[in-house]
Amino acid sequence: MKIFLISRTTQQVITVDIQDQKATSFSNIRVEGLISPYYDAYFEKDGVLVPYILSKLNFIKFLLFTRYYQRYLVNGKTLRPSTTRSKQLSFVYLTSNGMNKSLYRKQMWGYFFGKLVNIFYPYNRPNLVFEKSSDRAQESGMVYFEFVTEKYPKEKNYFIIKKSATDLAKIKKYTNIVIHGSFKYFYLLIRSKMFISSETPVHAYFWRENMGLTANVVRTKPYVFLQHGVLGFKKLDNMFYGDRLTAPIRLITSSQFEQDIVTRNLGYDVKKVPITGLARWDLIDLKRERTNLRDKILLFYTWRPWLDDVDDETFATSEYLSSINKSIQLIKQMNLDKEIIVMMHPKMQASLSEKEISNIRLWTDSDGPLNELMSSVALLITDYSSLAWEAYYREIPVIFDMFDQQRYEKEVGSYIDLNHIPFGSKVVNKIRDNVQQIIAQDYQMTEEELQAKGTYFDFQDQNASQRIHDVIQNIDLRAINREKRRLIVRTAFRIIFKR
């Protein structure tokens, strides 16, 4: 039988043959020319391509035992059959992200012992804390972990981090550090009662696997979302909607303004969106900030999802590349008495010539934490990044360079009116005009911006971690887990027994 694999992003079509409809046949198909990460399967019926729907048995196999059907390819990537919510056969073509047979054995034993201990000793379960890709210790996750470890040492909180992470050295002094990929790590994924992180649970289980026994536990684990910035300029993925299994049980906010965004747009009850401020702002002493030597101009542009799968030639002619490069060159030509720092996507950096990046400094994670850099920034130039809110909190002037606003609003979306930004200045003609205005203000925010600051930050102290801890201590996990089990059963029943 012939089936047609169609890329979700590029619409590439690949034709393959399958011998029968057994799950092993799908895992053993021979296919070449894959270029995209996700493909959906179709077959031809009466001259029309229709979705290939899996049998209930195959759907359950792929849902629970997806790793068993995965193939490791010679190019370092993996290919595995998967399924969509509608039970359509799909294929995932991605790197293994380091997962191998040895790690898989640890995963299975960790799952078994974690489940066993939870059954016979369901008490005193720990919390797991982590940050982006389990590769950092420099944001709200780390700040909260250090706070509870030092102030509440009897509480069980573990921090996940990769052995290769540069930030590992600065938190090695703590005993409750768990190396990502160890047996203890896999065990605690199951044993833990809750995740606490500035990222989603996928950053704890970063193995390119969205199905399987462990992955399904991780996806539905109760978690407190500490956030890594204030909401406003970018809409959240639908996994954050309040009625989803994947939604956090608490979503930390910084003000009534932000809480209203969440309750109005994402369907959360007010009690699930506590106003505490961000934990990592506990590191900011505003009185000292105002006296810092601010000798840098930072350009920080966010990536665009519509550029994820474009080839190098297409990217080279994109509005994104040309607009950002133009802004960089205009800033350089002004010969300012500040060091120009640029943070950008690796693909963007690789596309600029040595001449174009001369006399500027490209900042990467290896240069140090972003929060430390921000303490010496005199001016932030960005597009839609939540970093703008941190700049506002630190009282750093902000220029918004929204050169593709219409497309961004259509494909990503914003919770606030981008034509009426509550702070900062927006580029209308040339960025040079905005920079000159900031220079005229001696790199200071306007009096109006400073007076309005309290509207967007309910707290400007260094006690967010304590408030977050108080919130977490009052969570009724039993009630939450009962509700989650009910939703899991109802969702599984609907998916398996209804088409």
Image: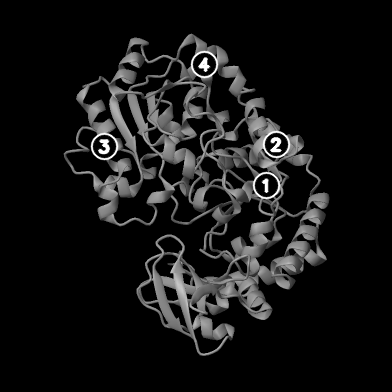
> Which residue lies under the disc numbered 3?
325
- Distance from disc 3 to disc 1, alpha carbons, whole Å, reads 38 Å
Q: Which mark is residue 363?
A: none
Mark 4 or mark 2, which has the lower sequence index? 2
Which circle's residue, 3 or 1, is located before the other in the chain? 1
Counting from the top left corner in percent of width and height, residue 413 is at 51, 39
Q: Is residue 369 visible?
A: no
Q: Residue at x 36, y 24 (%)?
A: 427
Task: Please state which amino acid type lies under the numbered disc 2.
Answer: Val
- Type of amino acid at the residue the image marks with label 1: Pro
Q: Tell which circle, 3 or 4, labels the residue nearer the N-terminal end.
A: 4
- Counting residues from the start of the chain, the first of labels 2 and 3 encountered is 2
User: Can you identify the residue that label 4 sits on?
Assistant: 287
Write down the residue under mark 2: 273
State the residue position of label 1: 248
Q: CA distance from mark 2 to mark 3?
A: 39 Å
